[in-house]
Every structure is written in C-alpha cells, then in structure tokens.
Image (tube, grey):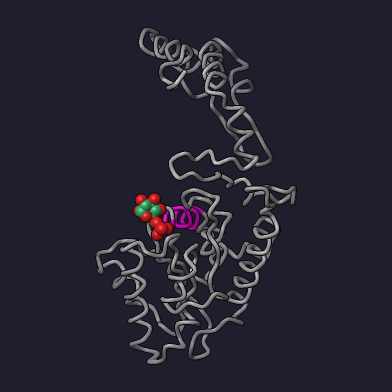
Amino acid sequence: MSRIYESDAWQTLLQRANTANPPHLRELFAADPERFDKMSLRVQNILLDYSKNLIDDQTLNDLLDLANEAKVDDWRRRMFQGDRINITEGRAVLHTALRNRTNTPVYVDGKNVMPAVNNELARIKKFVNQVRRGEWRGYSGKRITDVVNLGIGGSDLGPRMVTQALKPYADDRIRVHFVSNVDGVEIANTLRPLNPERVLFVVASKTFTTSETMTNAHTARNWLMSSAFDERAVAKHFIAVSSNKEAIKSFGISAENSFQMWDWVGGRFSLWSAIGLPIALYLALASSKSY
Ligand SMILES: O=P(O)(O)OC[C@H]1O[C@H](O)[C@H](O)[C@@H](O)[C@@H]1O
C-alpha cells in the first residue's frame, strides 16, 4: 500500500459514507443506551466524548482497520523512540519529550535529551518567577506589567489561544499582548497605551529571520529606544525564543536572555517548550507543579 486512500479499509469507509443513509443521532442513542459509556473516555479531568459523531460499531471497527493498515502502532513507537518520522523536514517529532515529566530517557540520535529539556524548563521557571516577583525590572527600575509576544504562525497561535482560553485564571499583575501582523497598525495600537519602562518583549521565532516578526521586533526596539536612549535597555526588555543563536546575538539579545526551541520538534506547536513562556508569565503556572 503506498497511499492510505488506496487501502481496502479506506475504500470500505468511503463506501459506507457514500451509500449509508445516516441515522439521526437520537436514533443511535435510542438504539444503544450504553452508547455514551462505550464511546467516551475519561483521563483525569479530560473527557473525550465521541458518542455524538455519526458512527456506529461497524464504522468504529472499520476505522480501527484503517489504523491497522496505516500501521499507526508502528509509527507511534517510532515517534516515541525519536525516529525522524517528519519526512518533509527530516526531523524527529518529539513533542512527547517536552511533556515527559517522568524523566524516562528520550533519545535523539543516541543522546538522551531529557537533561537539556529539564535544564531549559528550570531556566524558564526561574525567569518567570523573577519577572512575576518584580525582581526583574525595566531599565528605569520599574516592574514589568506587560508582556508583548512578537511572533507569527506557530510562534504565535499556541500561546495566544491558551492565554485567551485561560484568561479567567490570570491575575492582573501581568498583561499579555500578541502582535503578528506586519501591518504596523497592529504594533502601533498595541504599544500606544503601554509604558516602555514596564514592557517585556518576547521575540518568538524559530528561525529568527521571519520578516513579519523581525519587522515588528525592530519597531519595538526603536519604540523602546525613543524612551530609554540607551542600548543597554534592550537586555532588560527583550528576550528571545529561537533556535538561531547567531541571529539573536546580532539583534542584541544575550544568550542568557534566550530560550531554546528544539531542532527535534518540527514546527513550533509545543506549548511545553519555551514557546509557552508568555503563558507562564501570564498565568503564573511556573511556580506550580502543573507547569
Ligand atoms: O518561528 P518562525 O521561524 O518565525 O516561523 C513562524 C512561522 O512562519 C511561517 O508563517 C510558517 O509558515 C509557519 O509555519 C511558522 O510557524
């Protein structure tokens, strides 16, 4: 089998989807009082309820056949062992290492990555605590009250979504803003009400070359300079989340103010990595076990 849609299991599902006259969900529930129990899973506080999909036992079996034909088990095993299963980028897909709080070793090219992951999480925690406790101060000695994340795509959407969703759990100590649009109106409107002495910019870019993000980062830097008049202020107001150490340095951000994005995670969507820093700053999770 070369393509999944050429497999027998796919064709079986397709036929059922095309020919079956789908029943109403009410009928499916009436026909099987156990439906919810059978088609839901609960893990701690997370409930996965798939009973409200238009599927019956037969469709579920067909879907499992499809998973078998696609060798999902094997791919999952290869994912956990750090194989380069992201074939377009030639990378491992180890978001699981970032969520691994058990410390079981996770290997990439024969090297256990957990010590590096834990070290970076400890740096993030320390940094977040410093900012939230007011130990980290702006160039004029004032506390940070606003965090502005400058990033786009995967370096923006995850933390933006989580901070929005968990807003009720945030306190007022730190506000968080997200700027991704290259149209200067967005950054201008975001910065207008803010006090440069109290703003921390998080420049989030795996490559540190993305035009939108770098344009906004330079705008932010100029905005800070028009108030601070001293290049040393950059160190107090800019941190980087990236894997491009050279570019971070040329922008003027020191290594100690940079947090690592990993080469063995394709894309940026792992909120458990440094990309989730604005979440930790906003929600104060860094000091709790849930981080
Ligand atoms: O993190 P960066 O290197 O700045 O990339 C940010 C984004 O750039 C582009 O929009 C890509 O299509 C996205 O996949 C990526 O997430």
Q: Nearer the viewer, residue 269 or 248?
A: 248
Q: Is residue 192 magenta?
A: no
Q: Nearer the viewer, residue 84 or 73?
A: 84
Percent x, y of residue 198: 46, 81
Please determine whether, in this image, residue 69 is positioned above or below residue 214.
Answer: above
For residue 153, say whether it is visible: no
Percent x, y of residue 203: 44, 68
The C terminus, quarter of image: bottom right
Seen in the image, is 260 located left or right of residue 11? right
**Residue plotted at (59% across, 18% down):** 35
Percent x, y of residue 247: 43, 70
Seen in the image, is 64 located left or right of residue 244? right
Please determine whether, in this image, residue 131 is positioned above or below residue 111.
Answer: below
**Residue plotted at (66% across, 54% down):** 113
Please determine whether, in this image, residue 2 is positioned above or below residue 192.
Answer: above
Q: Is residue 159 magenta?
A: yes
Seen in the image, is 126 located left or right of residue 168? right
Range drawn in magenta? 155-165
Q: Main secondary structure of the magenta part?
A: helix
For residue 273, say whether it is visible: yes
Please determine whether, in this image, residue 169 is positioned above or below residue 82.
Answer: below
Specify the quadrant of the image occupied by residue 220.
Answer: bottom left
**Residue plotted at (59% across, 40% down):** 83
Percent x, y of residue 27: 48, 12
